[in-house]
Image (tube, grey):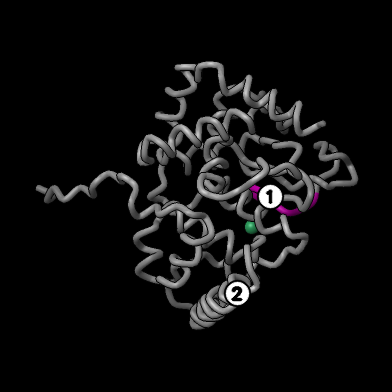
Amino acid sequence: MFGFFQNRRRQKLLAEPFPEWWEAILRRNVAHYSVLSDGERATLRDTARILIAEKSWEGRGGLHITDEIKITIAAVASLVLLGIEHDYFSRVDAILVYPDSFQTPNIEDDWEDDFISETVAEGQAVYRGPVILGWRHVLDESRDPACGHNVVIHEFAHQLDFLDGAIDGTPPLATPADEANWATVMTAAFRHHQEQLKRRGETFFSEQAGDNETEFFADASESFYCHPHDLDEVAPAVYELLKGYYRVDPRAWAWPAESNVPLG
Ligand SMILES: [Zn+2]
């Protein structure tokens, strides 16, 4: 019965016109929005609206939550859901937003600000708990995918990874063959990255991606959405794998042409 009422509520919500000024926020704050196809844009708007309505959005560290914050974060989170079957991150009840980087709160203290750890983060995904984000990083990165990082994509990729009950860099997959293929491709790419880090050369993936396969998947997801052409060049097997998983092809999106104007 719960599903019935939930579906009816969602249908009612999506029957309402999408607010024009929300569209303006998407155009201004979410660079990905402008490169998607019309169909993908419509899916993204619908998914974002449901995330906005069904999650508890809470400001922390003195931040007042606005519609701009909600629509921006919800739209970027919806990017990773564009092609896959999903349940709107049903295990993520709340999205907590700090003004900037934050010292991670402790679960025992109900995520309040009074008791914090020594760890400073731009984002955090808690297993069967909230996603926590620093708004300044969200905004900077959402406006500029070319920077190669996106903390919202990173943390929500973790939440996809957590869905099968294991924090291991492998989200739920359709078949045992898919799981075997995932392990082969991702483990090889992860080990290769660790080797490169040891040699202290320049690496495509982040230093944090070398910590474990969980971080590697989240970091590779950022590259997949923000630097798809580069990821495809550096690690084509990873690109193909993520394309199969996310069921979108970011290389095909209408990215702005790189400026070739010679410097005078
Ligand atoms: Zn992470």
Disc 1 versus disc 2: distance between alpha carbons?
31 Å
Amino acid type, mark 1: Gln
Residue at the image position 52 percent from the left and 58 percent from the top: 221
Q: Tell me where the magenta segment starts and ends, as one range.
A: 117-123
Residue at the image position 72 percent from the left and 55 percent from the top: 163
Q: Is residue 103 magenta?
A: no
Helix, strand or loop status at disc 2: helix
Residue 136, given in percent of the width and then of the height, sits at: 55, 37
Residue 149, given in percent of the width and then of the height, sits at: 48, 52
Question: Which residue is label 1 attached to?
Answer: 124
Question: In this view of the protein, can residue 57 be seen by the observer?
Answer: no
- Check the image and name the residue furthest to the left: 264
Q: Quadrant of the N terminus?
A: top right
Ligand 1 within 8 Å of disc 1? The answer is: yes
Question: Which residue is label 2 attached to?
Answer: 177
Q: Main secondary structure of the magenta part?
A: strand
- Residues 12 and 238: in front is 12
